[in-house]
Amino acid sequence: MARQLWLLASAAAAWPLDVPAETSFGKLVGEVSVTAGEHLPSVCQRWLGVPYAKAPVGSRRFATPEPWEEHWGVREAKKHGSACPQGANKSAVGSEDCLFLNIWRPKSTEKDLAVMVFIHGGGFISGAGDSAFPGPVPAWLSNTYDSCELAAREHVVVVSLNYRLHHLGFACFEEGTTNFGLEDQQAALRWLQAELKAFGGDPAQVTIFGESAGGDSVLLHGASRKSTGLFRAGIVESGMLGAATRQKATQQTERLAQRVGCAEKSSMRDCMRKKSIAELAAADDFQFNPYGALPWSPVIDEVHFQQHPATLYKQGKVNDVPLMLGSNTDDANFFVYLAYINATLPDAKYEAFVEGLLKEVLPAESSLDSQELARLYELYPKAGDDNKAVAGRMVTDAVFTCKGQDLAQDVSKRRDFFHWRFDHRSSCIDSLTHMFHVNFPGVFHTLELPYVFDTPTTNLCIWSKEERALSSRMQKMWAGFAKNMTPGTEFPSYAKSKQSFVFSTSDALEEDYRKEYCKFWKDAVYDKYRSEEELILV
């Protein structure tokens, strides 16, 4: 540690701390950043809180983002911009003036570097480009997505961004556009196409990557006609490919409007534009559920998506870009155990849980037949006093594992595709779960993120030698895919091998993981209801 501190001090003294970049809008003054991390110190240059679009306030609320046009002369870019508004039920944080991005690059004079643009998760209702936990959380714990290590070690430009969330991002009115949050992401990508060379990046080598709702976003950009040409590859971490019908999204928006006194349809949008963020948040009564279902989500709007995105992938009507997709072994444990915090899930409640899941994954008025339902309980049998473990396994299979494999089989027929599973739980995770007073067992949702960014302190971790090596391998493969459209020779193409790569302290290859279970979901749900637009989760 003493040596690391000495190296940090020496590095800070060796270079000017201010780093200018000449953009179309004037000089942007960033800074040198030095990280200690779990490896040797890394040195990068960074520009934080860079506006890419006008603040979506007033008449720009519930509207397509307007490009940034102001010439700033000289602008300091050393602090993250505000997170977008998030929260509900009388609790809200963030500011509508939130359309900022952050840029990291190695401390060098390299040009035409590959670019990795990260889209944060949070169920389209929370999160920010610098933090998974906006609000009064210590920076050392919340800054999950600090990209200095990734940029410096792998010699890539890394970008993160904010986008509108909740009703501000995905409200849907009878007239006009929707999917404002997705359009924010597209606006950021267009800004980067014009400005990347100022930061040493190559606009022709942009890869987008994201986790959870960010992984959803990557897949949605793959299916959106308005994203064509803005990126050349995508990496998906535990994305679900969810989308709501325009009818459902409009009804949800109308219910919110009624609660804030804006029931008149002809003036609904203008009326809601006059309400404060606090008023809208207080009226948004979404409920957390154990299925990973999205309270506000992208919409099948006929502008970005003519059909459900899953159908577009099945039919090959998507942007022709290679994908690298995977999930965590026990993703849904996060949702199930949080929903039943300090409570058990006995057999009687388990039956209600199963009914709730089926309502989420099946179209309205649809159901499993008696044989299918019997098979489901055979695969996921009742466990007596507490069924949280089997419930977590069921949701993980239905929403993440099996759906990812199904997508892999479809997409790999037409383009290069790499499939993976993250299967490592650090011994220090118990400290994190104790902090939140709930034990999330297994390799749950988000656990791969510190390894992608090399930010172990956000999980209160000090890694072992093997875990540091795992992080290095993942960073090299993520960046390798961004540079060369392949994560490396040891990671085979799914299109050619049907093999998936398993990330752990001892990596492995596998075929047909959870084969029997995935066959059930494919036969009973995915293929049976593929053409139904109301099939929200799959």
Image (spheres, rainbow, N blue to C red):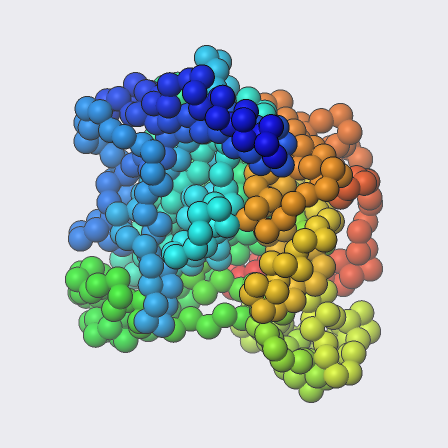
Which residue is depicted at the point 75% across and 32% down? Answer: 491
Which residue is depicted at the point 67% across and 32% down? Answer: 472
Q: Nearer the viewer, residue 186 or 26?
A: 26
Q: Residue 189 placed where, x, y %?
A: 40, 33
Which residue is depicted at the point 25% across and 34% down? Answer: 68
Is 141 left or right of 62, judged from the image as shown? right
Vertical placement of residue 118 versus 170, above or below: above
Q: Nearer the viewer, residue 179 or 466?
A: 466
Vertical placement of residue 228 versus 171, above or below: above
Q: Nearer the viewer, residue 433 or 3?
A: 3
Quadrant of the frame with the N terminus: top right
Q: Residue 485 placed where, x, y %?
A: 62, 26
What is the quadrant of residue 174 in the picture?
bottom left
Vertical placement of residue 101 versus 310, above or below: above
Quadrant of the frame with the C terminus: bottom right
Q: Residue furthest bottom?
A: 348
Is 522 left or right of 270, judged from the image as shown? right
Q: Residue 454 placed where, x, y %?
A: 59, 38
| Count of labels in the image | 0
Is 286 left or right of 404, judged from the image as shown? left
Which residue is depicted at the point 37% across and 30% down? Answer: 47
* Residue 190 seen in render: no
